[in-house]
Amino acid sequence: MAQRKRALVVSALLTLGAIILLATRGLNLGIDFKGGVLVEVVYPQTVELDNVRAELARGGYPEAVVQYFGGTSDVLIRLLPDPTASSAEISTKVLASLDAKANDVQLRRVEFVGPQVGEELKQDGLAALLAAFVGIGIYVMFRFEWKFSLGSIAALTHDAIMTLGYLALVQEEFDLTVLAGILAMLGYSNNETIVIFDRIRENLLTLRQRSVRDVINLSINQTLLRSIITHFTVLMVLSSLYFFGGKSVHGFAVAMIVGVLVATYSSIYVSSGVTVLLNLKREDLLPPEDKDEKIKAEKLAKAENDGAVV
Amino acid sequence: MQQYPLWKTLTLIIVTLIGALYALPNLYGEEPAVQITTTSGDPLPADFSATVAKSFEAEKIETTASRLEGKQWVVRLKSTDSQLKAADVLKAGLGRGYVVALNSAPKTPGWLHAIGAKPMTLGLDLRGGVHFLLQVDVDDVRKAAVDRYVNDIPALLRKNDIRYTSRKAVGDALVLEFADTEKLDKARSTISREYRELTLTTPPDATTPTLSARISDVEARTIVDNAVQQNLITLRNRVNQFGVAEPIVQRQGADRIVVQLPGVKDSSDIKERLRATATLEYRAVDESGDANSAASSGVVPPGDELFYHRGDHRPYLLKREIIASGAQLTSAQPTIDQQSGTPAVSVTLDASGAKKMLEFTSKSVGHPMAVVYKEVEYTTTYNAKGDPIRERHNVQEVISVATIQGVFSSRFQTTGLSNKEASDLANLLKAGALAAPISIVEERTVGPSLGADNIKKGTYAAVAGFLLVVTFMALYYSLFGLFADFALLLNVVLIIAALSIFGATLTMPGIAGIVLTLGMAVDANVLINERIREELRLGLPPHQAMNEGYNRAFLTIADSNVTTLIAAIVLFTLGAGPVKGFAITLALGLATSMFTSIIGTRTIAYYTLRNRKLKDLPV
């Protein structure tokens, strides 16, 4: 906790950096959110991307983005949404221009998202993020206290921004599955925060002599070992997904791995740090009747002492 | 050490058994099968098994089983060769009324089947197939409805000799101006009598007597609703032609339809078919010509066209001229004829259609009139490799021939039908006339190779993740680690069982969700074990430390899992397709992990350690 101030400053700076990254470089939005056409094809042997580009240009798609996708015979073709062309025709025409049947090109998958649907998913995604924050915030407020709630929301915001910043940095494709990963990571990161809060509450109520700051420090130390072990196991399974899961969950695995690493940090420093900043006092955690009792007792004591000294 | 509540032990045993039972079907493989359903969606006739058996007997095809499963008749076969042969035989033998599809049927043994156990449903990204999201162009429908009364109302007023001074279309409404309020009132009552669904108002700022007519909101919603419903019916029928096993055609929201076709590799035919529209034509029957001789000789009299009836394939010679077409049909409802009490179809035409119908019927009482239905259709057959071959035909059939009983214009009935025929005819009329155009707004096609690939990768990742965690827990927490490992195994079994029982769909993100749960489920046990270690350090005797560990940790575990659950719920509501699968497995995993980590490990710990005199806990 001694490093609390330093940690908060570092957090703030990194978060700022992440925000700048997001604003300038931006996320590499997948077609789920931008709309467009995605075609993945497999050639029987290594193929030159330039040849593919030429064929597509001949077929009327000079602006197609073509790249390798996990091997030199596996090609991913991406087209931006074209409001003039009739929707799903595009995927058929792309395949035709590659002369699929003649060259024994195998279709792995096609994804077409109309611009309207893409827009809707984008808005739904943002709404989902917001809903997750609100839902979690309300729950923490119920179980603990509003100051904790703000602390946990601060931590979550920090986690989300940092993870998104990293994704913007490496330009990992941001599709629906990655968004799912971020939401899952938020929920999981809050797990962490709650375990610490739980310990803080328990200690605050039992160790009445210690100052709030000391209690928080102690609680964090006590739960530190457990946190590290749990994060370790989760990172283990996530790396298993990353290495074996293939391309479809790749973005998801990256988002979660980064998220878990950031979450470890934030649960320790950010949420408790903010709570301290908000001046958490022991009384805040007492059940309401006890709190009133205490306030009444204090008032009474004050009144008595204000009387004339005899 | 206190007695451990018996109910907890019993619950654990029962849950384990049920879980194992219902997860079991996933271990059995699949066998080639042919699935049969009716095109109309009606249940199969009672003697169907005899019909099927007869077809096979002739060709000497051996089946391993042939029975009704749910709403479909499933014939299971020994090899893909006999599967293809069976499909051909059935198609030829059963005809148009049935959809015959190739599929792989799970080999769940009878006793499991009897308790309702079945394997998990695999999503499109694991099975391969096509997913479309279609948007019904409701604006078009609304515009057509508006156009109709913008044109028809002035005609109506003219017919009733009510003069208006000006008319114009303002947005959705038709605005008429009159010379005086008397004419306005007459107009109002005439219009409201004829068009009950319109709202008639006088604009507040009007200087002259003005009437504004527009569709009420309720009516507008009904029109949209009907259009989408009609499209749904039409699409279902069309999808059936593709010989796909277990297709999904469902409404999504106010104006969208989801179509999912597992196992389909090539989507271009299907796309065309889904968006095609059918048409209708009312034509006069040429009674002077001989339809039969025209059919056999191929020589059609000039001014006529040859058509065949949909049901009995009788040839008819119809005049070329079209009396009314589908575009002029405003409604078609099955109803009961007032006079005879028999089922009938009641049809309403708009003003232009009514005019021509009036002209025609005035000259033709006692003569027959036919309705022709035109559409593009696909048939699906299979080649030797089991690949589907789809051919398109232009269908033009006579769907109804009726004698004109009296003179009519806009409203008339077709009688002489059975209940089913009446509703079928009404549906066909609506499909040919009222369906709104649709556009494809989302398409996801996963090729079969990718599907198989995903399953492989997903399984590897899950197994690798599981082994890693299990090893770590055993090493770090020794005996209590092993307890946690058992809980983890039970957890996976329970998740699979739950997915199988609820018929939820497993997708690639769903597998990712299961893998994630593996990592998160141990969290509970880590909490418990660390707590136990702490209590031991504080000096509590072993058994007590264990109890304290469990008691203290429970609330924390519950609390922390709730927030991940909230995230899962949010994802579920957001969820499109695969993401929903992830939300489901995540939520399920959390629920089952709470059970297995706490009750599971505690029960085992109790029974393993209860009689031992412990100096220290192996944790």
Image (cartoon, helix red, strand yellow):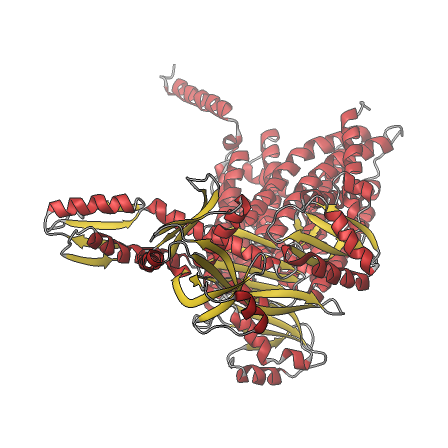
Pick out the residue farthest to the right: B612
Q: Quadrant of residue A58?
A: bottom right
Image location of residue B443, percent across then percent down: 56, 63
Looking at the picture, how far across and down is residue B293, in whole percent? 56, 69
Q: Residue at x 56, y 55 (%)?
A: B236
The percent coordinates of residue B158 (x first, y second) are 20, 55
Establish if B229 lies above or below A148. Answer: below
Locate residue A95 relative to residue B541 in the image: left or right: left
The residue located at (57%, 47%) in the rendering is: B567
Q: Position of residue B329 (x, y in %)?
A: 39, 56
The reply to whether residue B452 is in sight is: yes
Residue A29 visible in rendering: no
A119 vs B486, left or right, is: left
Q: Quadrant of residue B99?
A: bottom right
In the picture, measured across the screen, residue A287 lies left or right of residue B555, that is left
Closest to the observer, B38 or B7: B38
Locate the C terminus of chain B by quadrant: top right
Residue nearest the observer in this picture, A129 or A222: A129
Residue plotted at (69% across, 75% down) = A71
Q: How many marks?
A: 0
Between B475 and B483, the residue placed more toward the observer is: B483
Give me the residue at 70% from left, 65% from top: B448
Image-quadrant location for residue B577: bottom right
* On screen, residue B493 above or below B447: above
Tell which residue pokes out farthest to the top in this image. A310
Residue B519 placement, left or right of B179: right
* Quadrant occupied by the N terminus of chain B: top right
